[in-house]
């Protein structure tokens, strides 16, 4: 399960600091390169109103991991995803599945 994941720190830097040379990003943290190695079920949660990490990051990660299910939490931003029923219901369903 990933909550509000980013494609990479490089992509996030591009979102918030356009033009920043990638060489200055000390830890690129490439989720996009690792997610395809996951073979187990994967659940992604992302707030629809997240302005810190745009929803498109989770959408693109889902494309890279076809087994992933994306739950878009309507009304949620970045720090309050866990307060919405879509999150708790999805989390509970995932645990029940296991």
Image: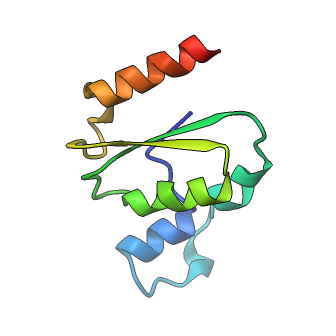
Q: Residue furthest bottom?
A: 19
* Rendered location of residue 84, percent (x, y): 26, 28
- Point out the image quarter for the N terminus: top right
* Rendered location of residue 58, percent (x, y): 49, 54
**In the figure, 75 relative to 6: above or below?**
above
**In the figure, 90 relative to 45: above or below?**
above
- Point out the image quarter for the C terminus: top right
Residue drawn 56% across the image and 15% down it:
95
Q: How many marks?
A: 0
Residue drawn 63% across the image and 64% down it:
28
Q: Is residue 91 visible?
A: yes
Left or right? Give the position of 98 relative to 91: right
Q: Residue furthest left?
A: 75
Q: Residue furthest top?
A: 96
**Which residue is at the front of the view, 17 or 59?**
59
**In the figure, 38 relative to 25: above or below?**
above
Residue drawn 49% across the image and 58% down it:
59
**Which residue is at the front of the view, 63 or 20?**
63
Q: Is residue 30 visible?
A: no
Left or right? Give the position of 20 relative to 17: right
Residue drawn 45% across the image and 76% down it:
14
* Rendered location of residue 35, percent (x, y): 69, 51
* Rendered location of residue 9, percent (x, y): 54, 63
């Amino acid at each position: 399960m990933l909550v509000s994941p980013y494609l990479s720190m490089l992509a996030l830097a591009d979102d918030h600091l356009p033009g920043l040379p990638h060489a200055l990003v000390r830890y690129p943290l490439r989720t996009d390169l690792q997610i395809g190695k996951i073979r187990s079920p994967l659940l992604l949660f992302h707030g629809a109103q997240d302005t810190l990490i745009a929803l498109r990051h989770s959408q693109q990660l889902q494309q890279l991991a076809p087994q992933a299910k994306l739950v878009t939490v309507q009304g949620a931003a970045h720090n309050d995803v866990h307060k919405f029923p879509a999150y708790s219901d999805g989390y509970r369903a995932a645990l029940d599945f296991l």
